[in-house]
């Protein structure tokens, strides 16, 4: 099967977002908003463990230390995937038409992303050498301090420096908003098919740690890719089951909530609402 078109987010998508915000009624959001009301993002996206609580570092067993190493290894992987969204000849996040200021901003972000990747490699190496980790310091390379707005990070916390950049912060928030609005419209007939991570991340955005913001961005991109892949699979005469469902849509893993995500978003909506599959796909695209 040929691949669906490559995704990116740039000036054209920002223009579409502005149009969506003008033409979307509040009632279009309400089914998804009501479905997840009373839920918190932390129910679906476990915050990174802060090794230091109440001003002290608790003693941990060997098993707890192994769990902490595994958690921070996963966090390194997430941060690396996120940083790569800004890198390469055709990055996911594309910049406006070339200007001196835009070029300077792009070069700065690319430089900092390179530092993020280098720091992640160094941190992974220290995890391999057990006993050489400083998880308190490492935590603060993922999550900002309460006074982050006035802190000077230098080269020690490049991820924090990047996420605190006003241009980057604005662009990330707009992308999550873009996907959340489109998802809410597409899933209004079946709000259980929406992603709690995308919607709740959008709702709680300003209170999230930078690491959680990055994970919400990755979840939004996974959601967008999933919808596109399902539509592409159908065009190729294949079923939606041929496409892997993102982890944050697999509500069966959250049995206590009683949600179950069907393998096909649009097909299930069509059965319930009587709206044609093609019409539902147009709501997304």
Image: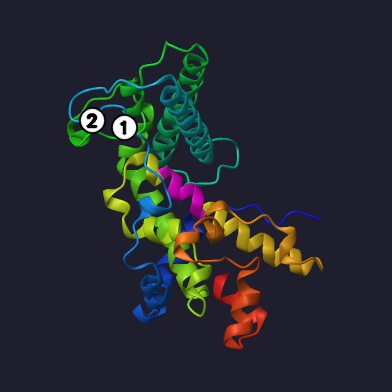
Mark 1, other Cα within 10 Å: few <14 / some 14–19 / many ≥20: some
Residue 72 relative to residue 252: left or right:
left
Q: Quadrant of residue 136?
A: top left
Picture layout, residue 228 above or below residue 148: below
> x, y (%) of residue 91?
56, 42
Asked whether 27 or 41 is in front, the reply is 41
Residue 173 in view here: no
Rendering coords of residue 242 (x, y %): 75, 59
Task: Please tell me the numbered disc located at residue 50.
Answer: 1
In the rendering, which numbered label is found on residue 225? none
Q: Quadrant of the C terminus?
A: bottom right
The structure residue drawn at horizontal position 37% and vertical position 37%, both measured from the top left corner, is: 48
Q: Nearer the viewer, residue 258 or 47?
A: 258
Q: CA distance from mark 1 to mark 2?
A: 7 Å
The image shows residue 111, relative to residue 254, as above or below, that is above
Tell me what residue is drawn at x 18 percent, y 26 percent.
55
Reading the image, the residue beneath label 2 is 53
Residue 217 covered by magenta stretch = yes
Residues in magenta?
214-220
Q: Quadrant of residue 278?
A: bottom right
Residue 28 in magenta? no
């Amino acid at each position: 099967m040929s691949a669906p078109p490559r995704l990116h987010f740039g000036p054209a998508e920002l223009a579409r977002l502005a149009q969506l915000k003008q033409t979307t009624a509040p009632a279009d959001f309400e089914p998804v908003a009501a479905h997840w009301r009373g839920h918190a993002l932390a129910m679906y996206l476990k915050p990174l463990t802060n090794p230091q609580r109440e001003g002290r570092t608790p003693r941990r067993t060997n098993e707890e230390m192994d769990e902490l190493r595994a958690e921070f290894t996963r966090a390194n992987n997430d941060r690396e995937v996120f940083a790569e969204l800004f890198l390469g000849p055709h990055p996911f996040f594309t910049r406006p038409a070339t200007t001196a200021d835009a070029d300077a901003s792009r070069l700065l972000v690319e430089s900092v992303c390179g530092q993020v990747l280098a720091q992640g490699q160094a941190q992974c190496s220290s995890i391999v050498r057990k006993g050489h980790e400083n998880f308190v310091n490492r935590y603060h390379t993922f999550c900002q301090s309460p006074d982050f707005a006035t802190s000077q990070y230098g080269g020690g916390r490049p991820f924090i420096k990047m996420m605190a950049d006003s241009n980057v912060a604005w662009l990330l928030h707009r992308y999550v908003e873009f996907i959340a609005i489109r998802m809410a419209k597409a899933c209004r007939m079946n709000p259980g098919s929406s992603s709690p991570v995308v919607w709740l991340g959008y709702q709680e955005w300003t209170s999230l740690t930078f690491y959680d913001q990055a994970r919400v961005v990755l979840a939004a991109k996974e959601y967008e890719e999933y919808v596109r892949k399902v539509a592409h699979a159908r065009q190729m005469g294949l079923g939606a089951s041929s496409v892997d469902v993102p982890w944050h849509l697999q509500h069966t893993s959250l049995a206590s909530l009683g949600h179950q995500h069907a393998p096909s978003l649009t097909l299930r909506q069509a059965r319930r609402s009587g709206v044609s599959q093609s019409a539902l796909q147009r709501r997304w695209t």
